[in-house]
């Protein structure tokens, strides 16, 4: 055959492995460089993190040392005689807190006499701190007398869901779950005139400064101003997006209110709905009470704590009060110095500055649904599920000097605290001398 169908194979140039060497070398060097840079970065980051951890540990140790030193100094101050303690205010307050814890523990465990001695020591240590001294004086007056017995102010057919005391301390408002708010005469315990009617269960009440007007709020988000004499609304009811928990009057007669909504809670400073401002919380709000200045409110929360919040920004102010069960009712005294909380059948009185309990909890037989202080701060009102409103006398502290209280505690206990905080029995002559001096200062404090 002259022609073949098979194509001749073409000769290919020979391939040398030497041509791959530069590429491999470049790749190797690149990987080495990347490894060095990455390793260096990792090493730098690790060393930096280690240095930060070491610094944090060192700062924590220094903070612990400072805290331990401050606590030790405070404990020395708490044990020493106040005349020999010349400590800065911060240390004095720390000592006051330690004394308060010790005294409260002793009193609640039944060792009231020694607890009184420590309360007196606290009053002496804080003699230049009016707020903390007031706390110790109030506790001395509370623990140094028999448990308070309440007076049933009045009774109504259903549970008392809201309470308010008039400026004269003789007229009271009480709400029920059917939408009626009644005016009661505190002397006779009888209702006066016809009730004030609202659309839902009454959740909050407040008297105006002159005692002639009142605010009534319900669980449907309505709140209105009412003339006490006529029981007629003064204008239309204001509407809110949820139940109203607290109402109050400002000096100019306008209203302040706190309530609930889907997003948490709301606050208003005025009558119009447009003034509503949302205030959210970290735990569901169950109850509220406005402070006298209208710029703060005490909230009772589902997590068993009561917290003081600023308005309108709703920032927490100071440590919470720890009840241990959902706080269904709260109250703030007219001077802002005392708080009251209720969780089921438990009611507690608290010092607003120290944020610690004052005295023993009042004995209750029924769930407490609402609380209110009398304007003079002498009594606490409780509204129960049994339909009764009870008036609890509070410890009187007027005219009680630190010296008088300290002598009273020593005479009562028959002992005193030495400079090391140990209980030292009084000799008969020393006991008689203190009794004589106490009589000169006015004798034991009256209930």
Image (spheres, helix red, strand yellow):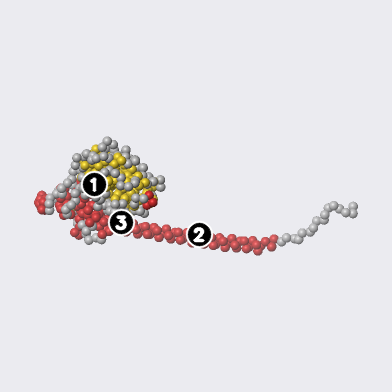
Residue at which label 1 appears: 166
Please tell me how crowded label 1 is: few (under 14), some (14-19), or many (20+) other residues with Cα within 10 Å: many
In contact (CB < 8 Å): disc 2 and disc 1: no
The image position of residue 150, as x and y in percent, is 21, 41
Judging depth in this view, the residue of 10 and 126 nearest the camera is: 126
Q: How many marks?
A: 3
The answer to which of marks 3 and 2 sits earlier in the sequence is: 2
The image position of residue 201, as x and y in percent, is 33, 40
**Mark 2, secondary structure of its residue:** helix
Q: Which mark is residue 42?
A: 2
Please tell me how crowded label 3 is: few (under 14), some (14-19), or many (20+) other residues with Cα within 10 Å: few
**Mark 1, secondary structure of its residue:** loop
Task: Say whether residue 177 is left or right of residue 42.
Answer: left
**Mark 3, secondary structure of its residue:** helix
Task: Name the quadrant containing residue 20.
Answer: bottom right
Question: Extreme top residue here?
Answer: 157
The answer to which of marks 2 and 1 sits earlier in the sequence is: 2
The answer to which of marks 1 and 3 sits earlier in the sequence is: 3
Q: Residue at x 22, y 53 (%)?
A: 134
Judging depth in this view, the residue of 433 and 39 nearest the camera is: 433
Alpha-carbon span between mark 3 and mark 2: 38 Å
Question: Extreme right residue here?
Answer: 1
Alpha-carbon span between mark 2 and mark 1: 72 Å
Residue 348 seen: no
Residue at which label 3 appears: 68
In contact (CB < 8 Å): disc 3 and disc 2: no
Residue 234 seen: yes
Closer to the observer: label 2 or label 1?
1
Alpha-carbon span between mark 1 and mark 3: 50 Å
Please tell me how crowded label 2 is: few (under 14), some (14-19), or many (20+) other residues with Cα within 10 Å: few
């Amino acid at each position: 055959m002259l022609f073949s169908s098979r194509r001749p194979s073409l000769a290919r140039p020979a391939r040398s492995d030497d041509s791959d060497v530069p590429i491999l070398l470049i790749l190797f060097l690149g990987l080495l460089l990347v490894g060095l840079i990455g390793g260096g970065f990792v090493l730098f980051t690790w060393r930096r993190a280690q240095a930060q951890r070491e610094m944090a540990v060192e700062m924590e140790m220094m903070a612990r040392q400072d805290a331990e030193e401050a606590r030790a100094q405070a404990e020395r101050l708490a044990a020493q005689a106040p005349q020999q303690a010349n400590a800065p205010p911060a240390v004095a307050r720390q000592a006051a807190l330690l004394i308060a814890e010790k005294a409260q523990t002793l009193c609640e465990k039944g060792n009231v006499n020694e607890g009184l001695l420590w309360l007196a020591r606290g009053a002496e240590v804080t003699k230049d701190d009016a707020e903390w001294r007031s706390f110790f004086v109030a506790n001395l007056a509370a623990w140094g007398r028999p448990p308070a017995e309440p007076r049933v102010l009045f009774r109504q057919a259903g549970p008392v869901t809201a309470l308010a005391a008039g400026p004269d301390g003789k007229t009271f408002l009480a709400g029920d779950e059917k939408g009626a708010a009644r005016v009661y005469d505190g002397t006779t315990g009888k209702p006066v005139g016809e009730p004030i009617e609202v659309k839902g269960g009454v959740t909050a009440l407040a008297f105006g400064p002159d005692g002639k007007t009142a605010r009534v709020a319900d669980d449907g988000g309505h709140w209105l101003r009412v003339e006490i004499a006529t029981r007629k609304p003064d204008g239309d009811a204001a509407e809110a997006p949820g139940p109203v928990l607290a109402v109050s009057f400002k000096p100019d007669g306008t209203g302040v209110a706190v309530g609930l909504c889907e997003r948490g809670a709301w606050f208003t400073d005025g009558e119009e709905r447009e003034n509503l401002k949302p205030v959210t919380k970290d735990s569901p709000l169950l109850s509220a009470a406005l402070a006298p200045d209208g710029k703060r409110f005490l909230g009772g929360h589902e997590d068993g704590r009561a917290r003081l919040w600023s308005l309108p920004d709703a920032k927490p102010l100071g440590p919470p009060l720890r009840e241990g069960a959902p706080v269904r009712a709260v109250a703030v005294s007219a001077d802002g110095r005392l708080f009251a909380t209720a969780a089921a059948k438990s009611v507690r009185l608290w010092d607003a500055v120290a944020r610690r309990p004052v005295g023993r909890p009042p004995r209750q037989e029924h769930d407490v649904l609402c609380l209110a202080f009398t304007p003079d701060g002498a009594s606490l009102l409780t509204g129960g599920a049994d339909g009764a409103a009870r008036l609890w006398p509070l410890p009187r502290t007027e005219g009680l000097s630190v010296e008088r209280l300290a002598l009273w505690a020593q005479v009562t206990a028959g002992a005193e605290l030495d400079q090391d905080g140990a209980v030292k029995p009084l000799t008969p002559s020393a006991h008689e001398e203190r009794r004589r001096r106490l009589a000169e200062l006015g004798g034991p404090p009256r209930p």
